[in-house]
Image: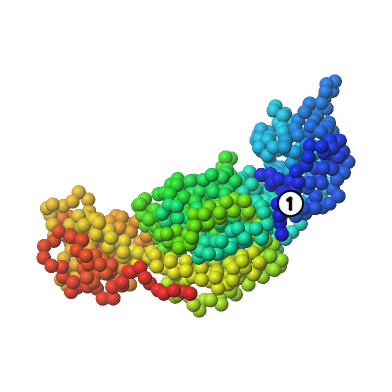
Amino acid sequence: MLTPNNCLGPSDALTDASNRRGTDATTEPDALLARLLEGLTGHQQGVPNGTEGPLQDYIPFPFLFGADGISREKDDSPPEQVCGPIVIQRLTRGATGHDFGLLIAGITLDDRVISLSIPASRLHGDPSDLARVLADRGIRVVPSKEKALISYLDAARLLARQRGWLTAQPRLGWAEGSRAAFVFPEQVVGVQDSVFQPERANRMSESCRASGTLAEWQRRIALPAGEDRLATFALCASFVAPLLRPANSDSFGFNLYGLTSRGKTTLLQLVASVWGHGGDPGADGLAFCRRWNATGNALESLAEEHNDLPLPLDELGTFRNPAELGRAIYNLAGGRGAERLKSDSQRRTPRNWRTLILSSGEISLGELMQQNGQHQKGGQAVRIFDIPLPAAGLFAGHALVGQKIRGLKQAASECYGVAGRAFIDWLVGEFADHHAMGQAIRARLLSRTDTFDESSPEITRAAQRFILVEIAGELAAEAGVLPYDPQAIKAAVRAVWATWRATIPEVDDGKRAIRAIGEFIATHPGQFPLATDVDRLPHSVAGYYKENQETGDLYLFTETGLSAALGDISKAAALSALEDAGLLYKNDSKRKKSKHFVRALGKTGRMYFYAIRASGVDPSRKNGGLAVSNGIFDTGRDGDEDTSSAAPNVPNVSDDDGGDVF
């Protein structure tokens, strides 16, 4: 089990050394070098013991190594200081023969031994960039000596070739290949001689850390959270992320929404504490939890950083481009970023990831999209599920709720990261490779398929994702990480499923289309003048209303009118659903449109329209597809509406289209 005392590791964002040394440590060059290398040997990254060697194996001519660090000899003048004590311990390269780099060991200004792995390409960029990276991590670099630093590292890497190679892992999560090996910033579980070496510096090596012990995390976080079903569900969901790849599942997530001060951010902090720093994202720069306050491109970068880990995102309402929210949901769940070019017009390798998204906000995704003129598609609704919080918030009915929540928040910022590492240790020990892990997960999924609700493919897909949360909780309990019994996990997941099913939007695009058309008619009655009118015509129309006793009254939608009514719902899905429901009038079997005479268009007023039976979409009709008759829809026409022409088999487009899959 990983503890803070063996959390040393290489990354482009430094990690603390195993021990802080006192100021009385020896400063003799050989002893100083031994101290540097001692702090980097025998750890999980696979650096073998006994790599200490004479100075000439590490320090190239004309550089010197002493108590103040690295200096360079100059003819007829004293040596000039370059930087603090740093050496190249090993060289790195990617599994495919690319991604070459350097594993650097250094002593910081506050006397800590740290390490970082940097891409070799950093030696060929702006020298100041590398100097800033080292300086930010506490290693002194003398101003104006940045080029000398590059020269030193370049010469030192020639000496480092004799010490063998480490495998560079460019991102966190499961390493490439069939073998189960998981990359953390400070170690790679399951393989030796590997290090985390990100292409670009990022915050994950600081936020994806471990502190405290598993027993402490269980006592202070898991057990108190187990008193609330939604908190239990959130912790189970946090263990889903590393199961997505072996389960061959796409990314998905949950948006927890409700009034302010109900515990939404606390839930995200609990999720974050499984894998990293559980601090409040609004107050702690090291927090594993992030905020929605980003562009779509920045979200892609965050998702890649959280590959095979959960991505907690707080404050949905702060998303920079709310009009692009629907696209952002598809991109996050799709697991692949947009195609982009480099500055030299060469194609950049697209970002890719698998993650479990945990979001929070005061309103649902569907509501926020609607506020910004978007329709939530069925596919979006089952990629990130909107889960309302109870009106009373977390731990409703419990005594001293505020004290309990404050205790959880403090615990999440003090004891974190150990549960996720224990879970990965168990998975790697339990399953030899991803294939065996995937078989075990799929077997559990298949054993429950007979309880699925088959009302629609979308609902079945949603059920599988909730059951994956249940399986993740069960595995974490079997690993000895979650102190919950299987029945408690099952009850929590099914309670959240029932909540989602009770508030579910229509996920079938065809039914949503019929509903959207009805709502558009109800809110835009003036845009459908009678087809026989020639006077009092509106400035713009979405179509016309045609009274016809033989066919039943029809709404004649123009192309632009139907597009406006549907928004971003697929027109093909809409027309197919209308046709299946008997709501699309056609007088030509080869066309979706039918030809009608509209007097306002003049003598040649016969044109093609999408003719939709009014009885199926007009909310003022008792037999309409919306099953609503509340008198609020007024077309301004005199006389009673004729409902005798209602189309047969008009579907009831209500919110409830199936029972509980569990």
Look at 55% across and 61% down and name the residue there. Answer: 225
What colouring method underlies this structural image? rainbow
Judged left or right of residue 97, residue 307 is: left
Residue 244 sits above or below residue 71 on the image: below
Q: Residue 317 versus residue 129: which sits nearer the camera?
A: 317
Specify the farthest residue to the bottom: 450
Look at 16% across and 52% down and name the residue there. Answer: 537
- Residue 627 appears in which quarter of the rendering? bottom left
Q: Which residue is mark 1?
A: 5
- Residue 416 appears in which quarter of the rendering? bottom right
Residue 5 sits above or below residue 387 on the image: above
Picture coordinates of residue 173 (x, y %)?
Answer: 64, 56
Specify the farthest residue to the right: 54
Q: Is residue 638 visible?
A: yes
Helix, strand, or loop for circle 1? helix
Q: Is residue 233 visible?
A: no
Specify the farthest residue to the front: 399
Picture coordinates of residue 456 (x, y %)?
Answer: 42, 72
Judged left or right of residue 531, residue 344 is: right
Specify the farthest residue to the top: 76
Look at 52% across and 61% down and name the residue there. Answer: 231
Judged left or right of residue 385, residue 424 is: right
Disc 1 packing (10 Å; few <14; some 14–19; many ≥20)? few
Three-letter residue code for mark 1 = Asn
- Residue 626 appears in which quarter of the rendering? bottom left
Total residue callouts: 1
Image quadrant occupied by the N terminus: bottom right
Picture coordinates of residue 252 (x, y %)?
Answer: 51, 61
Look at 62% across and 49% down and name the residue there. Answer: 207
Judged left or right of residue 441, residue 35 is: right
Picture coordinates of residue 642 (x, y %)?
Answer: 16, 70
